[in-house]
Image (cartoon, coloured by chain):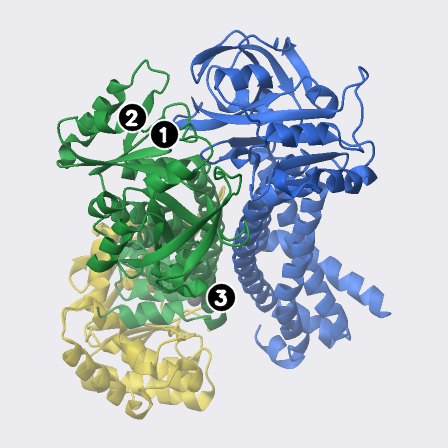
Amino acid sequence: MKYFPLIWAGLWRKRARTCLTALSIVVAFSLFGIMRGVTAGLNDAIAEFTSETRLITQSRINIIEPLPLAFLPRIESIDGVTSVVPYGYFGGYYQEPRNQINTAAVYIDEFLEMYPEFVLPQEQLEAMMRTRTGAIVGRDLAERFGWKIGDRIPLGSTIHTQRDGSSVWELDIVGIWHMRDERVESDDIYFHFDYFDESRSSGNGTVAVFMTKIGDVSRSAEIAERIDALFANSPNETFTQNERDFALAQIEQLGDIDFFVNAIVGAVLFTLLFMTGNTMMQSVRERIPELAVLKTYGYRDAGVAALVLAEALILCAGAGLLGLGIAAAAFPSVFEAMGVVPLPLPGSVVAIGLAAAGFLAFVSALPPALRAQRLSIVDALAAR
Amino acid sequence: MAAIVSIRNVLKGYSRGKQRVEVLHGLDLDVEEGEFLALMGPSGSGKTTLLNLIGGLDRPDKGEVVVVGERLDRLSSGRLAQWRARNVGFVFQFYNLLPVLSAERNVEVPLLLTKLSAKERKRRVHAALELVGLADRAKHKPTELSGGQQQRVAIARALVSDPVLLVCDEPTGDLDRETSDSILELLQLLNREHGKTIVMVTHDPKAAGYASRRLYVDKGVLVDRTMGAAA
Amino acid sequence: MSVFKQIFAVTGMNLKSVPQRLGSSFVIVIGMAGVVGVLVAIGAMVQALGDTLLSTGSENRAIVLRNGATSEISSILSPQAIATIMNAPGIARTPEGDAAVTTDMIIAVNLEKKDGGLGAVAVRGVSPQAFFVRPEIELVEGRMFEPGLHELIVGRNAQLEHEGLEVGDRIELRNSVWTIVGVFKSGNSHESGFLADVDTLISAYQRTQVSSATVLLTSPGAFDELEAAITADPTLDVQVLREPEYYRGQSEEVQAILSIVTTVVAGIMALGALLAALNSMYTAVSTRAVEIATLRAIGFGSAGVVVSVLVETMLLAVVGALIGAAAAWLLFGGNTVSMGNQVSTLVFQVRMTPSLLGIGIVLACAVGFVGGLPPAIRASRLPAATALRAV
Ligand SMILES: Nc1ncnc2c1ncn2[C@@H]1O[C@H](COP(=O)(O)OP(=O)(O)OP(=O)(O)O)[C@@H](O)[C@H]1O
Ligand SMILES: [Mg+2]
C-alpha cells in the first residue's frame, strides 16, 4: 500500500486532535463491546450450557404452581422419552436467608445421567444412594463454607417447613461434585427427592417441574407437545419447553434489555458520528491547498476523496479495534461479576463492532470526502 | 523546433454571481520546445489564468489549447489529470509542500501514481533531490527547511516524474534576492542541460532576465515586449 | 480595565464567534446531550422503579412473614400465627370495629403480554379490611369483587402490560375461571397485579394457609409493641417488618445493579464528552490564536482569556445537557416499563424529576470545566508575538 505514508501523515497532521478523536472512539467501542457483549453473550452462554434434549415441564398457570408426582410415569411412557426426574425446588439458605443456595431435590442417579456435565466420583454416588439424608454439594460451595465429606449441615428453606414445623433440614454431605467445564461455578446442592417429599409438612406428592431427557433432539418439539396433550383440560395443565427455550424465556421476562442496550449504544454511536465527522471536516478544510496540489500532480478527484475516506477508515477501524480489544479483555470479568460463566466476547459482537466502525468512518468522512473531490484546483490554489 | 504549447484565440472569463469578468480575450501563444519563457504583467492581468490553461489545471471557455500534442480543451477532467501526471511539473510561489511529509516523501508524491516499484521510486526521488542539491536533506520536514530549500524540494517534486514541461507561478515571489537567484539558476540549468521547457510567471524583471524569452500579459492579451510598459 | 470587565468583554467576543464555529461547537453540545440523555433516561427509570416499590410501603403498616421467607410468595402463615396477630396490640380498628389486618395469599399466573411472550402476574387474595389497611387502592372502573364469587379486579398497569384484561374478560386460574369485574389504581406496585377475595382464592386453590399478614398500626410508633407481642412465641416462627423496610429489601438488589450500570455507562460516556470538549476547544483556541494574541497584545490579562474559554465550554455543555434531557423526556417520559421474574411483573411509568435534570446540569458544568481548562490555559499562555506572526 504505497499510499499509506500519505494517508498516515494526513491523519497525524494535528496530533492532539487525532488522539482525542481516536480516544473517544476507543471509549465508545469498549462500551459498545461490553454492552452488546452482555446481551449476545447471555444467548451464547445459554446455547452452550443448555441442551435441547432436555425438556422442562411446568404448570401452565405459573411455575410456582406444583404438579402431581403421579404425572411422572405417564410422561415416562411417552415414546422417545429416556428418563424423567422430579425437581423439588427447595429455596435453600445457609445460616441466614441472604446466603441463598440453589438447592434441589431430585432422583440423584437419574439426574446425574441426564446431566453428564456434572462430575461425581462413583463411590460418592454409591454412598449417596445409600444415605437417605445425604446431599451432594458443589465444589465451589464446599470451599466457600469449608465443608467436607462427612459434615452434617443445617440447610434452611425459604419455602418449605418440616413436619415438626422447623424450616431447617439437616443434610449429610456424602459427595462433592463439580462441573466438567471448569469455568462454570459448581455451587448447587442436590439431595433425595423422596426424603424431601416425605419430610415436608405440605405439598407432599407434588413437584415444581419435571425434567425429561429425550433420545432424539429433532423430536423435542413433538414430545413437548405430547406431554402437554396428556394433561390438557385437567386441573394441572402443563407447559413443556426444552431447556434452552426455558432459559431464554427467563431472560426475556427480566424486561426489554435489548431495547435499552440498543438505545444506549445508538446514542453513543450517534454522538460519535458527530465528533468524527467534525474532526474529518476540519482536517479537510485545513488541507484544501494541499489536496489541490495533489490534484495538480495528476491525482484524480475520486482518488483524493478516497484518500480522505481511507484516513477516516484507518482512524475508526484502528481505534474501534482497540476499543473492542479492551472490551474483549474486560468482558470475562464483567460476565463473572454478573454471575455468568466468564465466556470470551462473542465473535459476532466484534464483527458487528467492526462493521459499525466502518459505517462510522464512511458516514463521517463522506461530506469532507465529497468536498475534497469537488474542490477546484484553480480556486483552491488561489485560496478563494 | 516544434511548438510544445500552442494556444489559439483563447477566451477565458469568470462569473461571480451575475457579474462576469473576461480575463483572456482571444489570446494566442506559442512556446517552442526547449524554451524558457517568462510571463510578466500587472497584477490581475491574467497570468495565472493563462498558466493554469497551459498546465491543464483549467479549461478555456473558447479556443484551442494544445500542449505536448494534446488538445487540452477537449479532455475530460480525469484524462486531464492523467495528462498532467505524465507531462507537467508545477512550482508555486508558496511551495505547497505537504507539511507532515519529509522532503523525500513530498518528492515521491507524483510517483505514487505510476506503476514504478518502491525501489525505482526511491532511486528517482534521490536523483531529483540530488539535482536540486538537497540530497542531504531527504529526511527533513518542510518546517525544518528554509524557504529556498523548500522551493528546491518543490522543484524536485516537479521534476521527479520527468515531465517535458515545467510551469512555475512566481517561484521566487516569496524569496530574497540571493535565494531567488540560486533558484533561477537551477531553473536555467534544468532548461539548458536537461532540456525542460519552462513557462514562468514573475513580477521581477531580474528574474525574467534568466528566461530566454519574455512576454507581457496586459488586460488579457499578450503584448510585445517593446510596447508594454513594466508595471 | 477591571478584571471583571475584561472577562466580560472577552467572553462576549468569544460567544459572538460561536456561530462561525458551529461545527465544533455542535460537537460539545451533541456529546453532552448524548451523556445527559442516557443518564436521565436510565436514571428516570431506576428512580421510577424505586419510587413504585418504595411507595408501596407505608410507615403506618407492618407486614408479617414466615421466618426465613424473603418475599411474600415464599411465605406461609399458620392459623395460630394469624390468631396471635389479630389479638396483638398497636393495631388500628376499622369503623366496624375489626382489627385493621389483611391476610393475603399470593399466587401467580402466566398471561400473554401485549408485546408477545408470557409474563407472570401476581394475584393477591385480600381480606375485606384490605381497603382500610391500604386506602391508596381506589376503584376506577367497574365494581368491587364479591366474596364467594370467582371475581377479581385488575390494576391499571397490569392492563397496560397484558392482553385481555378488560372488565368482563375471564381469566383461568387453578381449577377455576375468574371474571374481571373492576379496575383499580394504587400508584404503587399493587397496580401491576390483581386483587381478589382471599377466602375465595384459598378455597379455589384448596389451600389452608395464607402467605402474609399486613397490619395498619395505630401509629408508626406502635410497631415495637406489635413486634414484641407477635414474636413472643418462638414456635410461631414468624418475622415482623415495617413495610418500607420490606419493600426496600425487595428493590435493593435490582436498584444496586441498575445504579452501577447507570454510573458506569454514564461515566464512560462522560469521558467521551470530555474528550469531545477538549477536542473542539483546542481547535477553537487554535483557530482564534491570532484574535486572542491580539487581545493579549493590547493589554488584556490572561484571566479574561481563561474565563472566557471556560464559560464558553460550560455554556455549550449545559445547552447540550438541556437538549439531552429534553430528548430523553420526549422519547421515554411517561413510557411504561416492565421488569419481571417468574412470579410477578412490575409495571411502572418513567418519570422525569428535577433532581435528574440537576444532576445532568452539574455533570455538564463539570465536563465543560475540565474539558475547557487545558485549552483555556493554552490560550492564555499563547505568546502574543508568535501567534501574531502566524497570520
Ligand atoms: N476563479 C475565479 N473566479 C473569479 N475571478 C477570477 C478567478 N480567477 C481569476 N479571477 C480574476 O481574473 C483576473 C486575473 O486573475 P489572475 O489570477 O490570472 O491574475 P494574475 O495576473 O495572476 O495576478 P497576480 O499577479 O496578482 O497573481 C483577476 O481579476 C481575478 O480576480
Ligand atoms: Mg497570479
Mark nearest the camera among 3 and 2 is 2
Which chain does green denote in the image?
Answer: A
- Residue A72 visible, this angle: yes
Residue position marked by numbered label 2 in the rendering: A70
Element assignment for label 3? helix
Which chain does yellow denote in the image?
Answer: B
Which of the two residues, B216 or C8, is positioned nearer the viewer here? C8
Going 21% across and 72% down the picture, which residue do you hit?
B111
Q: Pick the quarter of the image with the N terminus of chain C.
A: bottom right
Q: Residue under mark 3: which chain is it in?
A: A
Name the quadrant containing residue B127. bottom left
Which amino acid lies under the numbered mark 2 shown in the image of this protein? Ala
- Image quarter where ligand 2 lies: bottom left
Residue position marked by numbered label 3 in the rendering: A20
Going 42% across and 14% down the picture, which residue do you hit?
C175
Which amino acid lies under the numbered mark 3 shown in the image of this protein? Leu
Q: Could you tell me if the residues under marks 3 and 1 are in contact, i.e. CB atoms within 8 Å?
A: no
Instruction: Confirm if mark 3 falls within 8 A of ligand 1.
Output: no
Mark 3 neighbour density, 10 Å: few (under 14) some (14–19) many (20 or more): many
